Image (tube, helix red, strand yellow):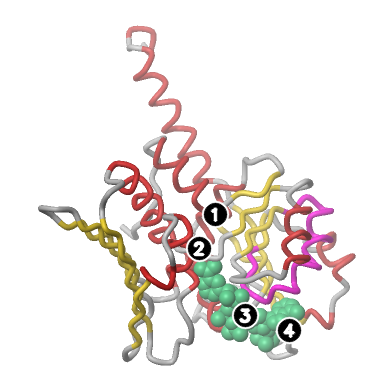
Amino acid sequence: MFSFLPAEIISAAVSRNREKEEERVIISIGIFGFGKTGRVVAQEVMEDKSCRLSWVIRKSHRNEGEYASHFCGLETEQGKIYSIDSIDPRVFFREHPVDVIVDFSINSAVSYSKYAAETGTRIVSAISHYEKDQMEQLKALGRRVAVLYSPNITLGINFLIEVSKVLQRIAPNADIEIIEEHFREKKGVSGTALRIAEDLGLDVNKHVNSIRVGGIVGKHEVIFGLPNQTIRIIHESINRGAFGQGAIYAAKWLMNKPPGVYTMEDAVMLDVARNRRVFEMAE
Ligand SMILES: NC(=O)c1ccc[n+]([C@@H]2O[C@H](COP(=O)([O-])OP(=O)(O)OC[C@H]3O[C@@H](n4cnc5c(N)ncnc54)[C@H](OP(=O)(O)O)[C@@H]3O)[C@@H](O)[C@H]2O)c1
């Protein structure tokens, strides 16, 4: 029957089937960190039907031996909690293998990832800041396994950065300003705003405007001022679930990738170029 259909229709159908197959695969995930963000990420992982949370590793002995699922109101037993001080990383990853580790802990945890990479485990690191030698360690892991490093793991922010770069290319004379708004207590300029400024080649001191009020989770705006019109690209984080969704997207994206160090921009823009779905919504 297919032989009467044009080749591109057949190829689109095959590719849709392949996407469905990829979605059906259950990915086992281990999480480093069970703090403010790690907890929310754990919940997002357990709510995703194509993922299974195998374990969580944290620093303290709090809730050791219990299941992350019980803290998220689930009756299943998913995500057994371990303290890093109670395990031997040289054997743990062999005895508790996972497809992907998602790191929302601390920059020094990159040293355990070495043992995980020896077992072929892919790594998603969301750590905001690495020292130079730690970054070298992360890059070294990329020679063995697929690693995705993203200090700004929200999908929308990566999309905002890429769209801003395109707009700057087609409107090179536009005035560009970045506005970042966060909760009152947040100190310093947001790392994301610094990244946007760097990517657009803007002087941070002149073009980044910070606003600190109340409880804003995070809002970034890039304004392009043109003679007769203004274009504003805005991203707003509503809650920390956005980090979990980004991490899950990164974990799935890494599944069929060869060793290397990738960024979230790589992932998002490749999928955008292929017209593949990036944002998932509960139906
Ligand atoms: N890329 C992004 O978009 C993004 C977004 C949000 C956060 N982050 C980053 O994610 C990290 C965590 O942020 P957070 O706000 O969740 O911090 P947090 O609340 O302080 O949580 C840190 C977690 O890491 C655990 N931890 C500390 N040292 C460890 C070690 N040596 N081994 C294993 N686990 C260890 C802590 O264990 P205990 O609970 O036992 O103390 C805690 O669960 C930070 O680097 C932050 O910048 C990145």
Instruction: Say if residue 38 shows up in the picture.
Output: no
Q: Residue 105: within the magenta?
A: yes
Q: Secondary structure at mark 3?
A: loop
Q: Decide: is 276 above or below 134.
A: above
Q: CA distance from mark 1 to mark 2?
A: 8 Å
Ligand 1 within 8 Å of disc 4? The answer is yes
Image quarter for ligand 1 equals: bottom right
Closer to the chain start, of discs 2 and 3, is: 3
Question: In which quadrant will I find the N terminus?
Answer: top left
Label 2 Cα neighbours within 10 Å, binned few <14 / some 14-19 / many ≥20: many
Q: What percent of the width, then of the height, locates residue 55?
A: 69, 70
Task: Pick whichever of labels 3 and 1 is earlier in the sequence.
Answer: 3
| Magenta stretch, overall SS | helix
**Tag 4: residue type?**
Lys
* Residue located beneath label 1 in the image: 250
Q: Which residues are magenta?
A: 102-121
Q: Marks 4/3: CA distance?
A: 9 Å
Residue position marked by numbered label 2 in the rendering: 153
Distance from the alpha carbon under mark 1 to that under mark 4: 24 Å
Residue appearing at x 41%, y 35% in the figure: 274
**Could you say whether the residue bearing mark 4 is in a helix, strand or loop?**
loop
> For mark 3, does the 10 Å Cα neighbourhood hold few (<14), some (14 to 19), or many (20 or more) residues?
many
Query: Could you tell me if the residues under marks 1 and 2 are in contact, i.e. CB atoms within 8 Å?
Result: yes
Mark pair 4, 2: CA separation = 22 Å
Q: Of the numbered discs in the image, which one, if any, rests on residue 59?
A: 4
